[in-house]
Image (tube, rainbow, N blue to C red):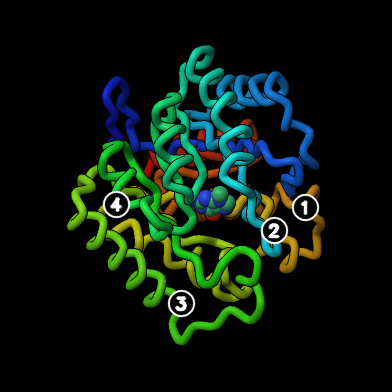
């Protein structure tokens, strides 16, 4: 399995790390330390040197309760850093956005992947993704970031997430997105209670078997905070355990804050797999 764009190929036969570069002032995990352009470039460079194959750039905070960001603000935050990374670093660039205009401008500026937590449901997003002809990540979410953690509810979370994702796949294929440009994401922490997150993590293999690359984003999330009683700065062990559990079941892309540590974990897994 691999991702293709005009100039690059990304082999997904072994799991790849996507490093998170939030360029929001209120970014939940680094207190906004990397919002300045040069600091963001240094952070991206560091993550690539540590082994990240993809840098995911987001200008909208998606943490529970976060407020919406205007189109102009989002463009101002993400486009200069995409251009700078595209000029200076050899890596895949992912744009984390739900807005059609941001997707379009980001791809024009050098983004290789569209990562949409709203699975191309916002106005114009689907058509921009079709025209851009780049890989797209479709994520499951119940509700919207502002309110999604107010009593999320499911009869069968695994079945419902699968139904949602397959429905989005059908819509995307019908609109003209190529099958090999689709990545799926179970949406850990997006309208999920603690038990839902662990039910989904345990079922990763079932989603891998759908035949699309699976992106797993559990890094520093409240599923570890709640379970282990850890604040956001102390969730590394939980995050690494989550990444390993997903990778062992075949998840091909791991979206993480702690790149070096995740790369070490994957290296250990790769060595064990030699003897299976
Ligand atoms: C932007 N963002 C925050 N968490 C995420 C996750 O779990 N998956 C994806 N695809 N994007 C995410």
**What is the CA distance from the residue labelled 2 to the residue labelled 1?**
16 Å
**Front residue of this view, candidates 270 and 38:** 38
Q: Is mark 4 on a helix, strand or loop?
A: loop
Q: In the rendered view, would you say 145 is above or below 247?
A: below
Mark 1 is surrounded, within 10 Å at the Cα level, by few (under 14), some (14 to 19) or many (20 or more) other residues, namely some
The residue depicted at 53 percent of the width and 37 percent of the height is: 56
**What is the CA distance from the residue labelled 3 to the residue labelled 4?**
19 Å
Q: In the rendered view, would you say 39 is above or below 194?
A: above
Name the N-terminal-most of marks 4 and 1.
4
The residue depicted at 46 percent of the width and 32 percent of the height is: 106
**What is the CA distance from the residue labelled 4 to the residue labelled 1?**
31 Å
What label does residue 212 carry, if any?
4
**What is the CA distance from the residue labelled 4 to the residue labelled 2?**
30 Å
Quarter of the image holding residue 206? Answer: bottom left
What label does residue 52 carry, if any?
none
Residue at which label 3 appears: 157
Report x, y in % for residue 7. Answer: 29, 20
- Left/right placement of residue 116 relative to residue 48 reads left
What label does residue 66 carry, if any?
2
Name the N-terminal-most of marks 4 and 2.
2
Closer to viewer: mark 2 or mark 1: 2
- Left/right placement of residue 251 relative to residue 264 reads left
Query: In this rendering, does residue 77 appear at all?
Result: yes
Name the N-terminal-most of marks 3 and 1.
3
Report x, y in % for residue 114. Answer: 41, 42
């Amino acid at each position: 399995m691999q991702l293709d764009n005009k100039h690059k190929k990304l082999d997904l036969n072994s799991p790849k790390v996507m490093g998170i570069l939030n360029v929001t002032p209120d970014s939940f995990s680094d207190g906004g330390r990397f919002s300045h352009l040069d600091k963001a470039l240094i952070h991206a460079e560091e993550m690539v040197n540590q082994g990240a194959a993809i840098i995911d750039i987001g200008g909208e905070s998606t943490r529970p309760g976060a407020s919406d960001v205007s189109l102009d603000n989002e463009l101002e935050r993400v486009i200069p850093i995409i251009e700078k990374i595209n000029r200076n670093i050899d890596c895949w660039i992912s744009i984390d956005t739900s807005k059609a205009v941001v997707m379009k401008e980001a791809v024009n500026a050098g983004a290789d992947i569209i990562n949409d937590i709203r699975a191309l449901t916002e106005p114009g997003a689907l058509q921009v993704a079709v025209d851009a002809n780049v890989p797209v990540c479709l994520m499951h979410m119940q509700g919207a970031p502002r309110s999604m953690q107010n009593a999320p509810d499911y009869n069968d979370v695994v079945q419902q997430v699968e139904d949602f994702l397959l429905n989005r796949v059908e819509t995307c294929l019908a609109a003209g997105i190529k099958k090999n440009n689709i990545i799926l994401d179970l949406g850990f922490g997006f309208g999920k209670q603690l038990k839902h997150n662990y039910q989904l993590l345990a079922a990763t293999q079932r989603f891998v078997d759908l035949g699309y690359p699976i992106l797993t984003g559990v890094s520093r999330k409240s599923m570890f905070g709640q379970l282990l009683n850890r604040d956001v700065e102390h969730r590394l062990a939980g995050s690494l355990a989550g990444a390993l559990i997903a990778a062992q079941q075949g998840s091909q892309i791991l979206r993480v804050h702690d790149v070096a540590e995740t790369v070490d974990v994957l290296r250990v897994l790769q060595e064990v797999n030699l003897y299976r």
